[in-house]
Image: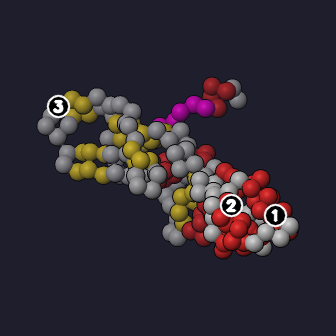
Amino acid sequence: MSPELEFAEEWLPALDWEGYYEVSNLGRVRSLSRLNYKGHRKTGKILRLKLDNWGYLRAQFYAGMKRWKPSVAGLVAHAFIGPRPPGLTIDHKDGDKLNNAASNLEYVTNKENNRRSAKLRSQNIPRGEKHYAVKLTDSQITEIRHLKLEGMSDRQLGETFGVSRRYINKIVNKQRRK
């Protein structure tokens, strides 16, 4: 198969909006040319998608006075995978909520979806010096442990490094920054 045909965009009607809107296997949505409710000719176009509060893309459909804001993932999955079976949800295989290509979507159980998203979240959490709320660098942690072995008190270490005695104790006991 040639690269041009492999990535060819395919368009199918959007669920319950046949004749008004179509979705593509690449996750795009377009309106079709038609007459609007006032009888004026409306030219079809690729729609601008908007992010909802949870980071998913949504389209905005209008027909007459009817309006609907469906998720793009739901539209693409229904058109290219088929209707969603009861008890299943749509999962983005690569974890990217903005990648609504049909090849990136699949139906899974809520339990599986939660397991996958937790795994992806844990991989993306900055740790150690890279964390936004870090108080001490890795070299300071090493120095604290070294000074503690030499007999310096938690209170003195806390004053020296600008953190609490309790935080120093957790560093020394490897409850923080193992």
Tell me which corner region of the image, top left, top right, bottom left or bottom right, holds residue 110: bottom right
Q: Is residue 149 above or below residue 103?
A: below
Using a 10 Å C-alpha cutoff, classify the residue at mark 2 as few (fewer than 14 neighbours), some (14 to 19) or many (20 or more).
few
Left or right of 75? Residue 154 is right
What residue do we see at 60% from left, 47% from top? 104
Q: Which span of residues is magenta-colored?
A: 7-11
Disc 2 residue type (three-letter): Thr
Q: Distance between the residues labelled 3 and 1?
A: 80 Å
Which one is earlier in the sequence, the residue at label 2 or at label 1?
A: 1
Q: Which residue lies furthest to the left in this view?
A: 38
Q: Which element is circle 2 on?
A: helix
- Tell me the tag on residue 147: 1
Q: Distance between the residues labelled 2 and 3?
A: 75 Å
Quarter placement of the N terminus: top right
- Tell me the tag on residue 40: 3
What residue do we see at 73% from left, 63% from top? 177
Residue 159 seen in this snapshot: yes
Mark nearest the camera among 2 and 3 is: 2
- Tell me the tag on residue 160: 2
Measured as percent of width and height from the top left, residue 137 is found at: 71, 53
